[in-house]
Amino acid sequence: MNKEVLFTEEPVFETERMILRRLDMDDLEEYFSFSSDPLVSERTLWDRHESTEDTRVFLEKVQRSFVEKIAYRWAVIYKPERRLIGRIGFIHLDEIHSCAEIGYALSCRYWGKGITTEGLQEVIKYGISHMNINRIEGRCNVDNLSSARVMKKVGMQQEGILREKFQIKGEFVDQIQFAMIRKEVATRNKKALAKGVTTLEIDDESSRNVYPFCSTRVCDCIL
């Protein structure tokens, strides 16, 4: 994994509906606007932000993780409204084992529109083609079917159930483990192309890879 390129380039991605750029302290007010909604954090390890001070503490943690090069989070800017509505990122980078964990959160006003899927594709594409990540993984609660669909739609495979992995809101919960392995991509692409599945191209220094992608509507949720 080459994580230096991520922190040096600070890439900005633009899709049809959104811009993804580095999350920073200037986002405090708009980040608080959605993170203070209890629905957004209902299934997460973190609690709703009750004040802008909570948001400030979180964003300072985000900046420290950037300086230490252990995580990178993008702000999701919804182009039609020109406002921040969530975040997507690599919440953990393991350079030794060439592994990255993805995470995301989105304002509930925009759930069910495929926005998380749209943004996550860009992050994964960059991780594979520019950072040379071997394994990208993610988890969600077993009852969070919407979040599970997001990871499936971007090409991640379910690996198993982690029993009582976390204690969330006072209750131990099982989590579903998903992952994408670099060497498996080419095989999946050949099968997808043979079936006429629409594909998402991925630039690669050694080859031209494509990831299967289906545009069916998905309910976005929180990991």
Image: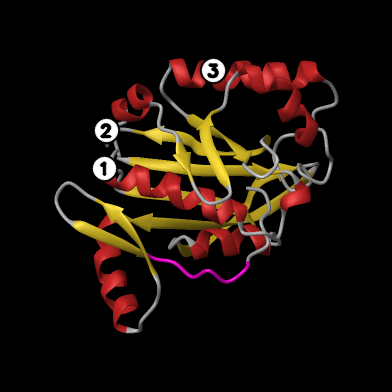
Q: Which residues are magenta?
A: 212-217
Secondary structure character of the magenta stretch overall:
loop
Kind of residue indicated by mark 3: Gln
**Could you tell me residue 68's position as x and y percent?**
43, 17
Q: Secondary structure at mark 1?
A: loop
Residue 71 appears at what percent x and percent y? 47, 29
Residue type marked 2: Asn
Q: Secondary structure at mark 3?
A: helix
The reply to whether residue 142 is visible in this rendering is no
Tell me if label 2 and label 1 are in contact, CB under 8 Å.
yes
Residue 45 in the image: above or below residue 185 = above
Q: Is residue 53 above or below residue 125?
A: above
Q: Which residue is mark 3?
A: 63
* C-alpha gap between disc 2 and disc 1: 6 Å
Quarter of the image for residue 29 reads top right
Q: Determine which residue is flagged by label 1.
A: 132
| Residue matched to label 2 | 2
Q: Quadrant of residue 126?
A: top left
